Every structure is written in structure tokens, then in C-alpha cells.
Image (cartoon, rainbow, N blue to C red):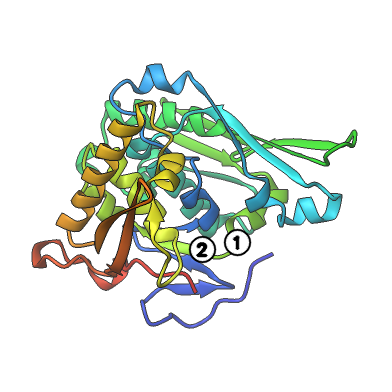
Amino acid sequence: MDPAQKQPDSHGAIVYDNLYQLSPHTSIQPNVLLRTGVFTPVGRNIKQDADKINKLDLSKDLVQLELCQKEGYDSVTVRGQRLNVETDFKVWCGILKVFTKYGYASNVVKLSFIDFAKYCGYPSRRFDKNLRMQIGESLGRIQSQSLTLKRKNADKATHTNMLLRAMYDGDMDLVELTADEKLWDLYRLDYQVLVSLQVLGKLPRAEVAQCLYLFFTSLPEDPHPVSFKRLRERLRLSTSKKEANRKIKNGIKKLESIGYIAGAFETKYGEQYYLIDQRHKRLLQPDMALDTGTLILAPD
């Protein structure tokens, strides 16, 4: 079903029942995928860490899915290889943008690799054999994310995937993506946030800072102080508490240095907190300012 098109909003995006037709530098994201540990820092040992199985209980966040309401499911878990921010999140952004644009007519979308890479935010100079391999491997990791929806204490469940099927044919230069049509409302759940891929691009090889950006973007206006305990849970770092806190503080300072966020650190009852003063829709430095097509929109 093709939703009715509305007039462009004040940011130049065309709204389709709360979905956006996006610029090459933005992606709309379900808030739950930003504030939970679906995408985490993996580091340089991507192949080694990707083999580790990541399991998350998203029941509190996803029980309002239409499928859960219809079937009475009260437990939702996601299980699969660890997803990184540097590549996997970009590819996931591309997947959502493809489904947003083409997915209403069919849950199967075919397009050229070049077009898909553009949706992922990669510049044309990166369209080489190495990028094809990276995107192909990333599609495999994303497709591995299995969702189990079930009713506690009952013999009833549904097993599916965040991405039902992914196919990449290097010889034909073709990408084919298949979504589970019963999960379309996953992308509309709660409220959505516009993520700037250009902000992520200002943080090369800084996955902790990238993940912190995704988390801070998902917060409502005037958020409460954010504890480092909550940030450690979000990042799921395989380090000591002391080292994790050091990486978190350095990551926040990087976000401050590019002009995205401003705030202050505070220690209370032995735990560190970050008090957010401002999150800027545009990066403050003139050479890093985003155009109107790359605004980071706060949640409605």
C-alpha cells in the first residue's frame, strides 16, 4: 500500500505518514535500534568479534509491534553476530532507505550495487572491489540477526530476521533485499530519529564516539543526566569498568570537539554522569556545518 505523499516539511524532506524521503547523507532510524546495543563498537578485529554471538532482550522496547499485539507475544529477543558501526550501521541505513523508497509495492527490492552503496552513504570514489566485499560481508552479518517473538509460559513463537534475506551477485553487480512484511511497523515504532551519516563521517575509526552519537541522538529533549553505567550497557565494551569509562569520556569529548554536543561531567555517589546542555542540529564549526538536507531532527 502506497501512503499518501504530503508536502515537503521545513527541512526539505517529503513526509509519507511519518517516513522521510531522505538525502544521501541522512537515514531515519527506529529509536529502539539507537538506544539499545544492536550496533556496538567492534574495533579492528571485526572478523574475530563478528563471530561472537550477540543476544539482546528487547521485550520492553518491541512488545508494541503489531505482530506482538496480534499474537499476544510479550518476549522479543534478537540474536546474531555482533554488528559494528563503521560498516554495518551504514549498510543498515542503506537497507532502511531502500525499503522506505521502494518497499511499499513489494517486500523484495532489487537494485544495482552502485545504487545501494549510494544509499549507504559511500562516495563514488569508494566503489571498488574492497567495498563490494565489505558490503557483502555486512549484509551477511545483518541477515544473521534473528528475532524471536514469543509468549512467556506458552508454546507459541515466531522466528524471523531483521532482514529476511540478502543476496549479492558480484558478477551481475546486483543486490536483492527481502524484508519480513510483518515487521514493517518496526521502522515506525515509538518515534524515529533522523541520523546524519556526515556526522558519523567526522568520526572515522572512532566507534565509541559513533555509538555515543547514536545514543544521544535518540534521547528526548532536555534529557536527564546520563550515567556512565547506562552508557557502558549501551556500548557493551569488553573492557574493565575503568577502561570503559575512559573510552566513554574520550568519545564524548570527540563529540564536543566536532560541535555536536555540549555538557559537563559530574560524579555522584561514586558514579560518573554526563549532563547534556545542548545537542546541535548543525555542527558548530563552519567547516563542518551540515546543509539543510543533513539536519539531525530531534524526536517529535
Mark on residue 192?
Answer: 2
Residue 286: horizontal and vertical position, in percent? 10, 68
Helix, strand or loop status at disc 2: strand
Q: Indicate the position of residue 172 as horizontal and vertical percent values.
A: 44, 30
Q: Where is residue 278? Give x, y as percent.
A: 28, 70
Name the residue at the front extreme.
Answer: 269
Quarter-of-image position of residue 238: top left
Type of the residue with mark 2: Gln
Tell me if residue 300 comes above or below residue 160 in the rendering: below
Q: State which quadrant residue 41 falls in.
A: top left
Q: Where is residue 64? Give x, y as percent.
A: 71, 57
Q: Residues within 10 Å of mark 1 (few under 14, many from 20)?
A: some
Q: Are marks 2 and 1 in contact (CB under 8 Å)?
A: yes
The residue type indicated by label 1 comes to Arg
Q: Which mark is residue 188?
A: 1
Residue 106 appearing in the image: no
Give the structural element (helix, strand or loop) at label 1: loop
Crowding at dot 2, Cα within 10 Å, few <14 / some 14-19 / many 20+, comes out as many
Nearer to us in this view, 159 or 207: 207
Q: Quadrant of the N terminus?
A: bottom right
Question: Which is more toward the observer, 91 or 212?
Answer: 212
Seen in the image, is 124 located left or right of residue 188? left
